[in-house]
Image (spheres, rainbow, N blue to C red):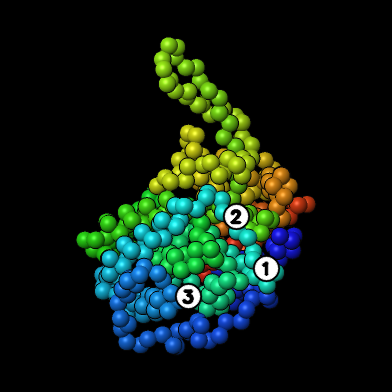
């Protein structure tokens, strides 16, 4: 893998007019990606699961058409008429089996120099922007890899459709579409910021079942990826090392346990090996105890202040400075960190860091490379959650 492979990685920003694709991308014909004018004006047929359980491009195009049409023409409670519960169950089960088998940190290789990797930031239920993105950047293909960097749901009206469409692409092209977890893919966030209510409104008495299945799928989402050996991507960013010491064990007992106690006042960057061993299958990443790495990866933020410190504003995760970015890049021979997690509202409260007007910012520019934040939801937030 050459060092130039990272040049074929294109972050997708929240500015729909600033979608960036590598010049090496293969042109996508009009017939490959239907425009809104080519979508059905009458109710499409409801989705049914293929008898052989194998998805094809035509099925996914039909899914996109159904979601586009229903989002504009159906009341939320009528959604099961076009996407029945058995189809939901089959899709989520199939996708979950794939996701749960993937490692915490994906190693994504670029097939050749003509391939492109598209990294997408937060989507937050903005289905129509996702449809536009896929049309503009081109569908996933053998030479076009997509890495979605989490936060598919909450604070947008179509989080369920957005997540289901991405799951369908994952099932169809599991080695070309990669879905990472965001902090909103959790029980706490989805019960607070709208996704749970959205699911209950759309599926009624089956809503709790659908919501539980989504939570189970969230648990299987990988935490991070390394693209072409040189680009680290994660929703929040960097993470701490969990140093532990064995406590005293009682005498004279067989099969006695050794209790591990985290060492206090030792905050330093974690390793990729530690990331690979973290337990990601939790509904809500913990903010205390031994399993802190998932919470760090999903919730942490960059800072202009050197060093690592607790992220007191969020109450979970870390703040890390340019020196930590340099240390992480140099130690693991990386050139670029791409993270998401912060929209325009978050950046308004962050002195010293750029705003999100263009959909991305270069937060740290250090000797070994750069740290970029990318946010792909142009109309965020579509709604605020009232208390």
**SS under mark 1:** loop
Between 281 and 73, the one lying in front of the other is: 281
Of callouts 3 and 1, the N-terminal one: 1
Question: What's the residue at 48%, 33% (across, down)?
Answer: 289
Q: Position of residue 347 (x, y in %)?
A: 58, 57
The CA span between labels 1 and 2 is 15 Å
Q: Is residue 83 above or below residue 262?
A: below
Question: What's the residue at 61%, 67% (across, down)?
Answer: 117
Question: What's the residue at 48%, 23% (across, down)?
Answer: 258
Q: Position of residue 294 (x, y in %)?
A: 51, 45
Between 218 and 298, the one lying in front of the other is: 218
The number of numbered badges drawn on the structure is 3
Q: Which residue is mark 3?
A: 131
Looking at the image, is mark 3 or mark 2 nearer the viewer?
Answer: 2
Q: Position of residue 371 (x, y in %)?
A: 67, 55
**SS under mark 3:** helix
> With 232 as the anchor, is 185 left or right in this view?
left
**SS under mark 2:** strand
The CA span between labels 3 and 1 is 27 Å
Can see residue 20?
Answer: no
> With 271 as the anchor, is 208 left or right in this view?
left
Q: Which residue is mark 2?
A: 107
Of callouts 1 and 2, the N-terminal one: 2
CA neighbours of label 2 inside 10 A, class few (<14), some (14 to 19), many (20+): some
Q: Is residue 284 above or below residue 175?
A: above
Q: Which residue is mark 1?
A: 112
């Amino acid at each position: 893998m050459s060092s130039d492979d990272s040049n074929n990685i294109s972050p997708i920003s929240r500015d729909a007019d600033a979608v960036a694709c590598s010049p090496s991308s293969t042109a996508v014909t009009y017939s490959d990606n239907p425009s809104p004018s080519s979508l059905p004006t009458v109710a499409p047929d409801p989705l049914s699961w293929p008898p052989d359980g194998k998805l094809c491009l035509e099925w996914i195009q039909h899914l996109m058409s159904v979601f586009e049409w229903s989002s504009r023409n159906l009341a939320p409670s009528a959604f099961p008429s076009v996407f029945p519960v058995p189809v939901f169950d089959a899709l989520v089960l199939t996708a979950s089996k794939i996701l749960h088998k993937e490692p915490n940190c994906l190693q994504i290789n670029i097939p050749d120099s003509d391939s492109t990797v598209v990294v997408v930031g937060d989507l937050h239920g903005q289905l129509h922007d996702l449809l536009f993105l896929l049309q503009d950047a081109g569908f996933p293909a053998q030479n076009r890899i997509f890495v979605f960097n989490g936060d598919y749901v909450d604070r947008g009206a179509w989080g369920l459709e957005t997540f289901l469409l991405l799951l369908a692409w994952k099932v169809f092209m599991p080695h070309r579409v990669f879905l990472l977890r965001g902090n909103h893919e959790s029980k706490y966030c989805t019960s607070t910021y709208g996704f749970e209510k959205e699911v209950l409104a759309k599926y009624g008495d089956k809503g709790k079942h659908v919501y539980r299945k989504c939570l189970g799928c969230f648990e299987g989402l990988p935490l991070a990826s390394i693209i072409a050996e040189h680009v680290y991507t994660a929703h929040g960013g960097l993470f701490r090392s969990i140093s532990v010491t064995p406590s005293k064990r009682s005498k004279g007992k067989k099969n006695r346990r050794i209790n591990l106690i985290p060492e206090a006042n030792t905050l330093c960057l974690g390793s990729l090996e530690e990331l690979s061993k973290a337990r990601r299958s939790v509904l809500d990443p913990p903010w205390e105890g031994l399993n802190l790495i998932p919470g760090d990866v999903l919730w942490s933020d960059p800072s202009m202040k050197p060093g690592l410190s607790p992220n007191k504003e969020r109450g979970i995760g870390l703040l890390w400075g340019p020196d930590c970015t340099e240390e992480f890049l140099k130690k693991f021979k990386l050139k670029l960190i791409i993270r998401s997690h912060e929209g325009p509202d978050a950046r308004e409260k962050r002195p010293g860091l750029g705003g999100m007007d263009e959909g991305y910012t270069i937060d740290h520019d250090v000797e070994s490379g750069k740290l970029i934040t990318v946010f792909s939801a142009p109309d965020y937030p579509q709604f605020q959650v009232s208390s």
